[in-house]
Image: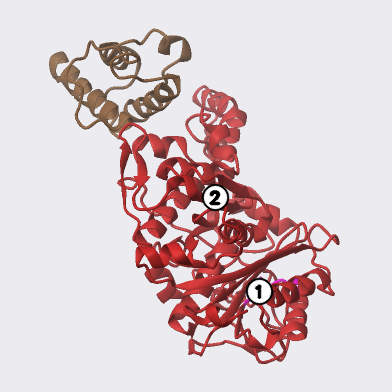
Chain colours: A brown, B red
Amino acid sequence: MSANVQQAGVEARVLRVVREVLNLEEEPRDLDISISRELAVDSLDQLSLFMALEDEFGGRIREEDAARIATLRDVVVYVQERMNPATVR
Amino acid sequence: MSRRVVVTGTGVVSSLGHDTSSFWNACLDGRNPVARIPDAWHRYAQFRSHLWAPLELPPFEGRFSRMEIAQNDPVTLMTGECAAQALRGAGIETRLADCRSNTLQVECIDSDRSGVFVGTGVGGVHTLLGSHLHQVLSGTRERLRSLAQSCADAGLREELDCLHERLAHPVRFNPFTVSMLMPNAPAAFVGIKFGLRGGAHSCVQACASGTAAIGQAWQAISRGDLDHALAGGCEYLDDPHGSVFQGFDACRALIRDCEEPARANRPFDARRSGFLFAQGGAAMLMLESAEHAHARGVPPLAEVLGFEQSFDAYHMLNPDPQGRAIEAMLRRLVAGAGLAPAQVDYVNAHGTGTVHNDACEAGVIERVFGRGVAVNSTKSLLGHTLGASGALEALATALSLRDQTLHPSLNLDQPIAELDFVRRRESRRLRFALSQSFAFGGHNAALLLAAPGAGTTAA
C-alpha cells in the first residue's frame, strides 16, 4: 500500500470517527479547521473523541500530546506517526 | 388536593425481552432465563451458588449517539431506552433539540412539570470495577508480558502467559468513571435526554429502590407538584470476575440447590434455598395525572392508588421475622385508598426465594389479606434484579390489571403457606393489586394499583 493511499485511508477514518462522535450531519471537509473553535469541541468532548480514535486505530493518545493536537490534520499526522493505522476495528 | 394518577406508557429491558410485549408474553409463558455462571469466574473464586440470570443488553448503537454510549454506563443507557419506550407508549412524541448532545424535546406535555424518578441499588458499578481493574492490573500485566518474553524456560513462560491472560482488564481507565458510577446518573441522563426540568430524583433503597421511585413519582403528581413523571428502576451488575455475584453469594443470599437449574429458583416453596442473582434489568413507567391523560386522549393501563413505605429498624440483611413494619405499611396503604384488605385481588410479592423473606412475607400476606388473595413472584421468572426489581414487578402488576391475567409463579411444588399461589397462567377478575418490595437495610415499600376504571370506585 502506497503512503498516499494509506494517508487517504487514515483521513477518511478520522473524519468518520469525528462525524460519529460529534454527531455531525456530514463529515468536515477541511482538515485544517480548529477542533476547539470550528468544531466547538470542549475538553470533555475531546476525551470522547480521543477515546474513539484510540479504539479505531489502537494505541494511546498521551495527555501531553493531546494538548498539541489542534486541527484534524494534526490528528491524521498523529495517527500515522504514533498510533497503529493498520488496526482494523 | 389529591389527584388521581395513571400509568400510560411502559418500557423495559430484561432477560425476558427488551420491550413490554416480549417481556409480558414471556412472563405469561413462565419462561425462565436461568443459566450456569460463566466458567471463567471459577478461575477467580469458589462459589456456593452456580446459577444466575444473565442479561443480554439491547444494541445501543442506533438508539444513542457514539458520545452517549462512551460517556454512560450500560445501566444508564438501559434506563434511557426504557424511558424512550415509555414515552412512545404514552403517545408522547419527541423532536431533536440539539444534534451534538443528541438531546430531545418532548412534545405535547409541559417539560417544566414533568419529572424523573429512578431507583437503583448501586448505579454504575460495571464502570467502576472496569476502571479499578485497569488501574490495579495494567502495570502488573505489562510486567508479566515482558517477563514472559524474556523467559527461556518454556514451562515458566507458559505459566506467565496464563497469568497474563487471567489479569485481563479494560483498555483504559475511563475518564468518565465518576459520572458513569454515580447512582443518580440514570435519572440525570433521562432528564437531560428528554429535557424534563421538573426534577430528576434518585432513590437508593436496595431492592425497594424501584418501588420507592414510582411511589415518590405518584406522590409528586398526586400532590400537584408535577403533571407527568417517568419513574422506575434499573440495575446492571456485570463484571468479568463475578465479584458482585460473590458479594451476594458470600453472605449466603443466593440459591444453594443448583442441581436442576430450571427448577432451582423456588420462591415460597419449602425447598427454596436463596434468590437467583440476575445480571440486570430496567423498567420505566410513564405516570401522569388522570386529567392530563384524559385530555391527551390516552387510555391508561392502570391507575396508581397509593404508595407507602416503612422501615424495619431490625437488621441490615434479614427482615424482621414478625414483619411488623411491613404489616403496618400494608394496612396503611390499603386503608389510605379507602379499601378493605379483602378487596385486594392480587399481591405481586417480593418473593425472593430466601428462607427468611418468604416465611415473613407469607405470614404478613395471610394476616393482612387472608388466604383468598392471588399471589405470585415475578422473581421466580426473572431472578432478583435488585434495584430494578420493584419497577419490573410494578410493570407486571399493571399489565396483569390491564389484561386481567396473572403470570405463573414457578417451581412452587410444596407451598410454605396456604395462600392462593398462582402456579400457571390464569385469567382472573382483578380490580385492585399490590406490588411490594423489602430491601437489605430494612426498607419496605409498596404500591397499590387498580385496573382502569376500578380506581374511581375506591374512596
Extent of the magenta region: B348-357
Q: Which mark is residue B297?
A: none
**Hey, what amino acid is under mark 2?**
Asp
Residue B236 in sight from this viewpoint? no
Q: Is B235 situated above or below B432?
A: above
Question: In the rendered structure, the residue with mark 2 lies on which chain?
Answer: B
Q: Is residue A65 left or right of residue B437?
A: left
Question: In the rendered structure, the residue with mark 1 lies on which chain?
Answer: B
Residue matched to label 1:
B351
Q: On the rendered image, what quadrant is the N terminus of chain B found in?
A: bottom right
**Hey, what amino acid is under mark 1?**
Gly
Total numbered labels placed on residues in the image: 2
Furthest-front residue in this view: B1
On the image, the x and y values in percent for residue A51 come to: 40, 27
- Predominant secondary structure, magenta span: loop
SS class of the residue under badge 2?
loop
